[in-house]
Amino acid sequence: MQRVRSRLVYQNAWMSVREDDVELPDGSIGLYGVVDKQDFALVVPAENNGFHIVEQFRYPVADRFWEFPQGSWPAEDGHAAQTPGPDPASLAAAELREETGLVAASFQYLGRVHVAHGYSSQRCHVFLAEGFTQGRPQREATESDMRQRWVSEVELDRMVVEGRFVDALSLAALTLLDRIRRAAR
């Protein structure tokens, strides 16, 4: 598949949307809508056979959800699609501190996950964090009503089964962690 033409449709500091005309393998022309966003980091804060999780309001779906701390920073130049994101490990540490106040003694890179590779270029870098010192959260205005709590692995499993922990990237992070733990046995 080859891109023939690309048009910027929308852009802000967090994302851009473009339409690409592409030549398909059979020679016909197709259209792809692509959302470009900087990569982000997700942190699995594990401690005492459990995890620290946060709950926040997610505007696009108008509801509150429990998830692992995660996020990105806007592009400094206001062009999200053309600016590489910050170092994923630094971003992970900053997001953990910002959302929970936790400062981790260690971070282990678990892997990366494509967020929605059918229409977006964004990737999520997943880290396991351990050994915490508690500080004060430094949440952004959009996170001012964020809640946090520690849950045991058993309670988190129950939340998943009951549909109370449904964030796709948090679930993918749990799968990565589980697979890495199994492979280490």
Image: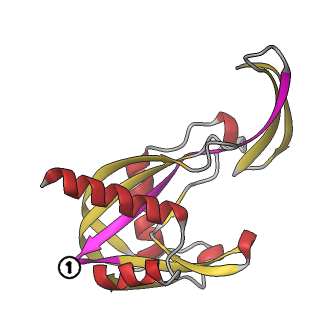
**Nearest to the observer: residue 129 or residue 133:** 129
**Nearest to the observer: residue 85 or residue 63:** 63
Label 1 sits on residue:
48
- Relative placement, left or right, of 103 versus 97 is left
Main SS of residues in magenta: strand
Q: Report the residue at 79% width, 43% height from top.
A: 17
Farthest-out residue, left = 185
**Nearest to the observer: residue 113 or residue 53:** 113
Determine the image quadrant of residue 176: bottom left
Above or below, 25 against 100 in this view is: above
Above or below, 25 against 39 in this view is: above
Secondary structure of residue under mark 1: loop
Q: Position of residue 40 (x, y in %)?
A: 52, 52
Can residue 112 be found in the magenta stretch? no
Can I make out residue 93 in this image?
A: no
Q: Position of residue 135 (x, y in %)?
A: 35, 78
Residue type at mark 1: give it: Asn
Above or below, 94 against 17 in this view is: below
Callout 1: 10 Å neighbours few (<14), some, many (20+)?
Answer: few
**Nearest to the observer: residue 103 or residue 130:** 130
Q: Position of residue 157 (x, y in %)?
A: 37, 79
- Relative placement, left or right, of 120 versus 166 is right
Q: Quadrant of the C terminus?
A: bottom left
Q: Report the residue at 36% width, 77% height from top.
A: 52
- Relative placement, left or right, of 113 versus 11 is left
Q: Report the residue at 45% width, 80% height from top.
A: 161
Which residues lie in the magenta part? 29-51
- Relative placement, left or right, of 69 versus 83 is left
